[in-house]
Image (cartoon, rainbow, N blue to C red):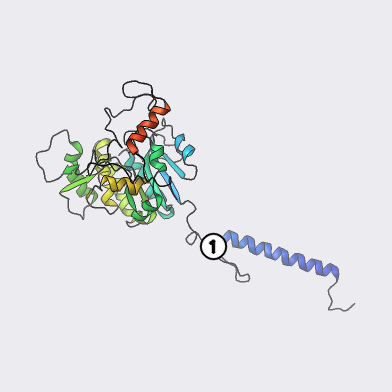
């Protein structure tokens, strides 16, 4: 046998050595996250990958709240449920203070470097008068969101009706303020603490109630230090919980680049945000009974099947209420991605 011709046994051993070498190289590469010079690997880093989560809900909740409706109706969204009164929850806050503001700021701080493309910041209950819907129902409100438009805006309030907050919530030049206007009274001092390099505006106005969408790029227009400062203000302020929360409720819009008075025309807003483009709108800030003013801040037990006066309403009645409020028209596809 030619001494330079490897024996079958030696050939098999050589093949095994080569295979083991490739396995070791692959293991080292996976462990270090770096390519090895002897093999032409393509490096795959977190910074170059597209976000794994394109859209997410950030939900401010109490332990008692039932938020199963969100995952049931929106299985393609990531759901970040923050529980403000349970320190052992998967997502929680440093302190239950400032209402939903503490949740929103905590999420932004926690995920600043790995935010999804689009986020909706929202309250926990499906039915609540904050929702811009004829039955105050969060499901159709969220399903009708026009996602391409939301992405183009960076920040978008999820409420179009002007009732409560628009065209002006606070005239900050006024000196004779009723003592019951606690947020109004506290706002000038709070503004100076939160935004020390900005001039106090004359008027602040935005439709309530602190439910809005944001893009990753819009959030990152501000450094994370700003959000940490806002949250620290919440933690330190002696203001009562509902006052400090409302101070930020009437600040989110200009934190994210809008004018101090941000009250879009309701007809245009309903078309852009929800795809309802044929509404009858006799006023700049209202479109018929698209959002009927509630007689109470608390919805009746059993809502919407149980009405304000205790009357029982079947699905046919509920459907007719929606038809009267919406009218037939150009309604874009629900939640288009």
Residue 30 lies left or right of residue 3; in this view the side is: left
- Give the total number of marks visible in the rendering: 1
The N terminus sits in image quarter: bottom right
| Image-quadrant location for residue 83 | top left
Residue 78 rendering spot, x and y as whole percentages:
47, 45
Q: In this view, which residue lies farthest toward the right?
A: 1
Up-down relation of residue 39 to residue 91 (above or below) = below
Q: Residue at x 48, y 62 (%)?
A: 48
- For label 1, the residue is 44
Task: Decide if residue 191 is on the left or right side of residue 102.
Answer: left
Q: Residue at x 15, y 49 (%)?
A: 202
Q: Position of residue 44 (x, y in %)?
A: 54, 62
In the picture provided, is 3 more to the left or to the right than 293? right
Between 133 and 68, the residue placed more toward the observer is 133
Question: Viewer-proximal residue, 213 or 201?
Answer: 213
Residue 71, can we see it? yes
Instruction: Give the SS element for disc 1.
Output: loop
- Residue 300 position, x and y percent, is 34, 25
Q: Is residue 86 above or below residue 216?
A: above
At x 20%, y 46%, the residue is 204
Foreground pick, 260 / 337: 337
Residue furthest to the left in view is: 176
> Between residues 237 and 323, which one lies in front from this camera angle?
323
Can residue 93 be seen in this snapshot?
no
Q: Most extreme residue toward the front, as rendered?
A: 328
Residue 279: x, y in percent?
Answer: 31, 42
Q: Quadrant of residue 221?
A: bottom left
Instruction: Tell me the crowding category of disc 1: few under 14, some 14 to 19, or many 20 or more residues within 10 angstroms, Cα based.
Output: few
């Amino acid at each position: 046998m030619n001494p330079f011709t490897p024996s079958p046994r030696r050939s098999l051993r050589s093949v095994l050595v080569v295979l083991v070498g490739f396995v070791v190289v692959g293991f080292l590469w996976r462990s270090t996250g770096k390519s090895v010079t002897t093999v032409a690997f393509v490096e795959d880093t977190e910074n170059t990958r597209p976000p794994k989560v394109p859209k997410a809900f950030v939900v401010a909740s109490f332990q008692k709240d039932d938020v199963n409706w969100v995952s049931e109706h929106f299985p393609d969204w990531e759901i970040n449920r923050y529980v403000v009164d349970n320190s052992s929850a998967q997502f929680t806050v440093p302190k239950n203070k400032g209402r939903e503001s503490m949740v929103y700021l905590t999420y932004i701080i926690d995920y600043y470097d790995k935010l999804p493309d689009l986020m909706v910041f929202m309250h926990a209950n499906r039915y609540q008068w904050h929702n811009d819907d004829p039955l105050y129902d969060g499901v159709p409100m969220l399903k009708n969101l026009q996602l391409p438009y939301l992405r183009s805006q960076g920040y978008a309030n999820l409420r179009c009706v002007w009732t409560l907050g628009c065209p002006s919530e606070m005239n900050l030049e006024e000196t004779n303020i009723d003592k019951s206007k606690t947020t109004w009274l506290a706002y000038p001092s709070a503004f100076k603490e939160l935004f020390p390099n900005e001039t106090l505006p004359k008027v602040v106005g935005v439709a309530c109630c602190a439910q809005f969408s944001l893009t990753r790029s819009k959030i990152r227009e501000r450094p994370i230090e700003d959000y940490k400062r806002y949250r620290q203000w919440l933690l330190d302020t002696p203001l009562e919980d509902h006052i400090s929360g409302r101070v930020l409720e009437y600040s989110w819009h200009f934190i994210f680049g809008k004018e101090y008075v941000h009250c879009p025309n309701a007809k245009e807003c309903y078309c852009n945000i929800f795809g309802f483009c044929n509404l009858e709108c006799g006023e700049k800030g209202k479109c018929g009974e698209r959002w009927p003013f509630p007689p109470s801040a608390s919805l009746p037990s059993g809502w919407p099947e149980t009405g304000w006066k205790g009357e029982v309403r079947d699905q046919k009645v509920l459907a007719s209420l929606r038809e009267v409020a919406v009218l037939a028209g150009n309604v874009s596809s629900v939640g288009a991605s």
